[in-house]
Structure formats: C-alpha cells, structure tokens
Amino acid sequence: MTIKRAAHPRYVFILVLSLAAGLGAFQAGSEVLGKLGLTPASAHDGALETLVSGQAYNDAAFRAFKALSPSARAAVVRGGLGWIKAHVSTAEFKAAYAGYREEQKPQPAEPVAQADDQMKAQKAEMEKNIAEMRKSMAGLDAETRKSLEEAIKQMQAQFEAMSKNPEQMAMMQQGVEMQREENKKQYAEQLAFWEEEYPADVRLLIKKRINEFLETSADVDYSAKLVKSGSKMRFADEAYEEKPADWKICFRAGKEATEAAREFAKAWLAELEK
C-alpha cells in the first residue's frame, strides 16, 4: 500500500482565507460572525477542520467578507485570529484534536497465517466448493456426473500432493514471512506519516499551518490584472493563472486583509517557537 499525502490545496492556515473569510470568528456579541453570516458552532467545528486538513472554505462567508471595506476586512482578520488563537489553547479544542488524531491512527494489518494453516483453510474452501458442485450435478446425466467426479478426484489428489510436498510448503512459508515483513514495513511508514500529519503536540501542527500560509502569501501580486473569460475572470498573466488556489484566495482577500493575517501569523509563530 502506497501512502498518499492529501491532494487538496493547503488553504492558508487558519487565516482570513479559511477562518475570517471562510469559517468566521467570535467576538463580543458575535460581531464578526454576524458580518459573515456564521454561527459560533460553525466556527468551533471549522477551526478543527481547518487545522487538521489545511482546507476550509465557505463561499457565502467569503462573499460577505469581500463586501466589507479593506480596513474592515483587516479588522475581521485580526478579530478572527485572536479568537482562533485563544480557542486552540482551550481544553475543549485540545480534546477534540486528540480524539480526531486517534481516529486517524493507522491499524496494523491482520496477522498472516502460517503456511499449514493456510493450507487447512484452502482445503476447507475446496471441500465446500466440491459439495456445491455435487449438489448442482443432481440433474445431470450419469456420464457427465462420472466425468465431473473424476475431475473432483484429480483436484483432491493434486491438493493432497501439494500439501505434503516439503518444498512447496517451504515456499509458502517463505511467502508468509515476506508478507509479514512487508506489512510491518508499511505499518511503520503509515505510523511515521501519521505522526508527521497529526503530531501529538497540536502546537506543531499550528506552526506548520502558519508556515504554509506565510510561504503561500509571500509573493502575492495585488496589482495583478484580471480579464473576462466567458462568465469568469482570470489573470491576464498566465503565470498567475497557474498559481495554486490558496495564492488566488490571498489575492481575492486583498492586501489589507492578507497583510494583517501575515503580521498576526508572524507574531504567533514567534511565540510558538520560544
């Protein structure tokens, strides 16, 4: 089994594009949530979703966010990030993350049976199939039944010869040992991947998301031109059109909001690295 990393884009940590502009935030009187048309429950659930997956996007909330003035967007971002920073430090969030992490933990493969146990299982399956064949032979003519019985005897004889062949059994046992080693190797790889993707210390995951956001948003060209393409808008510069979705969301969020998020992210990262 090959381990595949998540294919979805890393939607810029838990910032304007995935929190304030996607999940919402909570301030006194639900001011920010109200502006984005979201509920406290969606913000709480979304915080965990965004952190563990790196992805969260609420189109309706983003449209509400875009309708705000640039300065208001920046204020929403700061308020939203202030809320999320406090929320991920709570016992409630840590317990939710620990539970989610445990759910994602890989399980070892089923034990591989010894060669002789496999042969016993194969014999039982063969005898079951033979019994079903004989039931279906009831309506056949005598000559056909005789031919089928001869075929059954040959099959049984071949199986007995194979099960009593030391070389054959040795080869089967070798295959068992190889499969066990392969299962052990794959499980170790899966555990390592799990530890990397879902570290026990949630702060490590927060740092990872912050760094993803800072890397993604570092070179956004807010002056990039858009042109009409059918019913949609696209970048005039093809190089920008090829940028990942998270970079484009930064562009859509605007310089004021994204820079406010970057400033907050850098300060938070500095605290986490102490």
Image (spheres, rainbow, N blue to C red):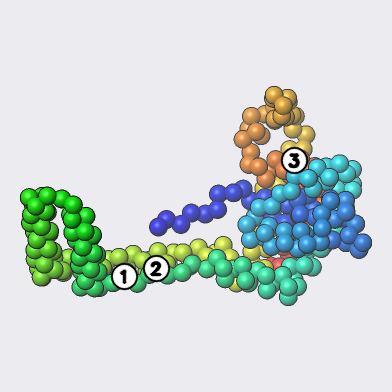
Name the element at disc 3.
helix
Q: Residue 17: x and y, percent?
A: 74, 49
Is 225 displayed left or right of 167 in the figure?
Answer: right
Is 170 displayed left or right of 74 in the figure?
Answer: left
For disc 3, the marked residue is 251
Amino acid type at circle 3 is: Phe
Q: Residue 261: x and y, percent?
A: 78, 53
Amino acid type at circle 2 is: Ala
For disc 1, the marked residue is 112
Mark 2 and mark 3: Cα distance apart in space: 45 Å
Q: Residues within 10 Å of mark 3 (few under 14, many from 20)?
A: some
For disc 2, the marked residue is 109
Amino acid type at circle 1 is: Val
Give yes or no for contact between labels 2 and 1 (Cβ–Cβ under 8 Å). yes
Q: Which mark is residue 168?
A: none
- Looking at the rendering, which quadrant does residue 267 occupy? bottom right
